[in-house]
Amino acid sequence: MSNVPTRRRVRRWRFLIALGSMAVSLARPDAAAAQEGARAVTIEEAIRLAIEHHPASVQAAVQSSGARADRLQARGALLPSLALNGTYSNSSNQRFDQTTGQLVSQNYTAQLQASYEIFGGGRRLAGLRSAGADVDAAEARERAQRFQTVLGTTEIFYAAAAAADLLTVAEQRFARAEQQLEFARARLDLGTATTSDELRAEIEVGNAELALVDARSALRRSTLELGRQIGSEEEVWPAEASLPSRAPDLPETEALVGRALQVSPSVLAAQATLRSRGADRLAAMTPYLPSVRVTGGYDWTAFQFPPREQSWSFRVIASYPLFNGFQREAALSRAGAQQRLAEAVALDATLGARVAVESAVQDIEAASRRAEISERSVTLAREDLRVQEERYQIGATTILELQASQVALADAEVTAVRARQELGSAVARLEAILGEPLDEV
């Protein structure tokens, strides 16, 4: 009979706890409520919009367009130039024309001129070769910048997704803290707990609320940053279930390294720049050779319209600079220095691609393992908290042990979110190095 009042008291404060938990769940705002009405994008949409609007991507595209214009100009140098000119003049004073012996005040002329460089020492061909290599380098840099934009957008997107998940974690911690406070107050009313239990529970509620405030602030910053990245002035939320839970299947590391040396934008850009500097050095040698140009024209001249006096001209011009103040030598020296620099950059890009790929693979493997361990830790922490709550209800444990389990669960959930965020960023870094998605490797 002595156990009957105790069981009644237990049922009573269990009812109070359940009622308090229901009130907390109905009163508190959560991540879903905060997201209502806000714009949400998937990672594919965010990447597409970022490539369209991010200044670095736009600048890289403009530079590629300029390089193609320079190549078009270099091709045009291989063709003859053609010009058509015409003039008309009139004066209030007449003048004597020696050709006709008349006094005239008007003059009409028309002229068709053509010019072509027969031989320029290979300068135009070297210029065309250099322009073509510059186009390849610019397009490779544009591709590299595109994937850098993809990487930056992915990191910002995953940061916003992690912030949303961390807000949920903070809300759950706050709800558990308030539930714990109800536990403590119910037991205090029944005389099975002390005032210290209630005070410690209130402290945990305050700490949980501080974490909730920080989580909301971090989420606000992340969504605004994501909006800026895709060209929106408002906050943008990541779509549901955005963080990856597992790493993709990776080929062998050597296969990835070999692929990077073939298609990595940084490697291709460095190699194209090296070819361009070699063509520039070849072009710097051409002033040591003579140049030959032919010009011709046809003229119409008259003092009354239409012009009837006709003439033509033809010239062959050969030029060879004997001495031009060491300009040729200085240009050749500068071109050689630029070529040596391009060789060093190309070698470093090749070595850097190998190191970057191997490091990225290790980061993915480590992040994947951390994600697995952290998910297991969350499962264990939840079970531990469940056991501690049951023990606290019957007075078999202290509030300190219950709070330690609650904090351990919150830490485990935060670690799990961060691990999944790092996993997604590590995969994006490897794709940025390769210059292509992993599913295309």
Image: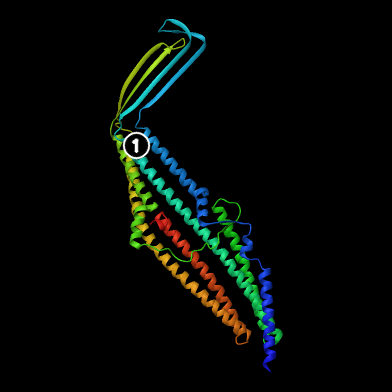
Residue at position x 71%, y 84% in the image? 189
Q: Residue furthest bottom?
A: 1
Observer-nearest of 439 and 50: 439
The figure's colour scheme reads rainbow
x, y (%) of residue 76? 37, 33
Q: Picture coordinates of residue 380 (x, y %)?
A: 52, 77
Q: Residue furthest right?
A: 189
Residue drawn at (44%, 65%), measured in percent from left and top?
247
Residue 279 located left or right of residue 205: left
Q: Quadrant of the C terminus?
A: bottom left
Q: Is residue 396 left or right of residue 371?
A: right
Name the foreground residue: 436 vs 366: 436
Which residue position is annotated with label 1? 327
Residue that protrudes farthest toward the top in the picture:
101
| Residue 258 visible in the picture | yes
Q: Describe the element under mark 1 as helix, strand or loop.
A: helix
Could one spot residue 337 in this view of the protein?
no
Q: Quadrant of the N terminus?
A: bottom right
Label count reads 1
Mark 1, other Cα within 10 Å: few <14 / some 14–19 / many ≥20: few
Find the residue positioned furthest to the left: 289
Which residue type carries mark 1?
Answer: Gln
Q: Is residue 330 above or below residue 178?
A: above
Front position in the image: 246 or 419: 246
Q: Residue at x 43, y 68 (%)?
A: 366
Percent of width and height locating residue 209: 64, 70
Up-down relation of residue 114 to residue 340 (above or below): above
Residue 213 spot, x, y in % from top left: 63, 66
Tell me: residue 362, above or below residue 89: below
In the image, what residue occupies the spot 45% across and 12% down? 306
